[in-house]
Amino acid sequence: MIVRFANLALRMCCLFSKLFFVIILGKSLNVDEFGYYGLISSSLVYLSGVIGLEFYTYSNKDLLRGECSVGKSLINQFAIFCVTLPFILFFILSFGFGESVAGRFFISFMLILVFEYISLELGRLLNILNLQVLSSVMLFIRSAMWMLPLSTYLYFDTDGVYGDLNFVLHIWLLMSAVSVICSYIALKIKNGFILSISLLDISWIVKGVRNSFPLFASSQATLLLFFLDRYFIKIFSSIDMVGVYSFYIGLINAMISVLESSLFVFFIPKTIMLYQSGKMDELNYEIKRLLMISLAVISILILISISVLDVIAGFVDKEIFYEYKRVFFFLLVCMLFRALSQIYHYAIYAANKNEYIFISSILSLIVFFIFFFISLIYFDAIYAVSLAIMFVAVFQFGTKYYIWKKLCGCN
């Protein structure tokens, strides 16, 4: 109980730091710079998944079963990183995506990508080794410890001496690097793993990549939605509109982090163990229990966010944010169904039926394109994207609920 409370407290601190940071950043940066911040943030999330090929979904299961060591997992994950990163860099530079996504901030963007990915993988290892509190501490270092001081500085920096996106990205890069160092040391102390080139296992990598490919493809299809939303707004509208959308989706993502940090992080390992033990009744009970708790938390978050929306928009003091605040209400509906669908997503993942997740995600991408281009006929790009994202969330919840019911034989 104490461990869970400590983990929850740390992650709640991260959440509120992110919320505060997004609001202060929206106030301090120019709207176009905030638009680039939104594009960079979503690109980092997407590319972090591409780099690792979701190999951790395979290696972590082997770790839980005691079939591989932490050292073996790390050295083989690093081998994948050394192959995929140059390909990604070549692709970005060849097709000019660097300029489109990050503009003049491209170098900072790529360096942050490297450290964010490594920190993410180390955090996953800490979680799977039942060291969630340590993982939360590292998340705090990477995502919160610097946000509150920087937010305070930006708020009082009325002259705007350092209040630009470049300065923010440099601080982000520094703290990501610190998080990597601290995570590695913590993992070394707790596990005492040994890194050796002899642990490199090409056949294990090939088997793992092949096994995790359906989940990789499905997760990337889903993450692609949350890159394309901003990118489409930039193409069909302007970078300023990306800034508006990024502000409101940033608030939504911070609230979803409440569920991921306080509930889902404990649910995933338990789901895998219950399914592997064949305890389907217990598993379905846990799913129903998590659904009820999630609905209660989401309802509270929605009521609070609606009641303070005008206050936040007034504080940011940018007319364009207030003008398009209806976007936030579409995204609230998206948050509800997106969070609930994640519960069934984890259950299907525990059942090792990644191909169903893949099908659902590919269909979701198709649904997004259809609803976006239809909505674009009648609405501005920012509303077209918001409506499309909302319909995708509803569709994903429906399909994953149906798939799980079929898998477990429930009525």
Image: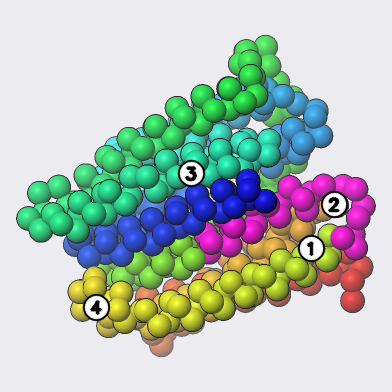
* Comes first in the chain, label 2 or label 3: 3
Q: Is residue 280 magenta?
A: yes
Q: Residue at x 23, y 54 (%)?
A: 152
Categorize mark 2 by other alpha carbons within 10 Å: few (<14), some (14-19), many (20+).
some
Q: Residue at x 45, y 78 (%)?
A: 304
Is 394 placed left or right of 18 in the picture? right
Span colored in magenta: 256-282
Find residue 139 and name its label: 3
Residue 88 vs residue 400, the one in the foreground: 400
Q: Residue at x 52, y 59 (%)?
A: 257
Categorize mark 4 by other alpha carbons within 10 Å: few (<14), some (14-19), many (20+).
some
Residue hosting label 1: 286
Q: Looking at numbered disc 3 in the image, what kind of residue is underneath it?
A: Leu
Q: Looking at numbered disc 2 in the image, what kind of residue is underneath it?
A: Leu
Q: Looking at numbered disc 1 in the image, what kind of residue is underneath it?
A: Glu
Find residue 237 and name its label: none
* Comes first in the chain, label 4 or label 2: 2
Q: Residue furthest bottom?
A: 378
Which element carries disc 3, helix, strand or loop? helix
Residue hosting label 2: 274
Q: Is residue 84 above or below residue 45?
A: above
Whole-number angstrom distance, CA of label 4 to CA of label 3? 30 Å
* Comes first in the chain, label 4 or label 1: 1
- Are the residues tagged 1 and 2 within 8 Å (C-beta)? yes
Picture quadrant of residue 263: bottom right
* Comes first in the chain, label 1 or label 2: 2
Which element carries disc 4, helix, strand or loop? helix
Q: Is residue 290 above or below residue 11?
A: below
Horizontal and vertical percent position of residue 325: 34, 80
Which element carries disc 2, helix, strand or loop? helix
Whole-number angstrom distance, CA of label 2 to CA of label 3? 27 Å
Q: Residue at x 42, y 82 (%)?
A: 306
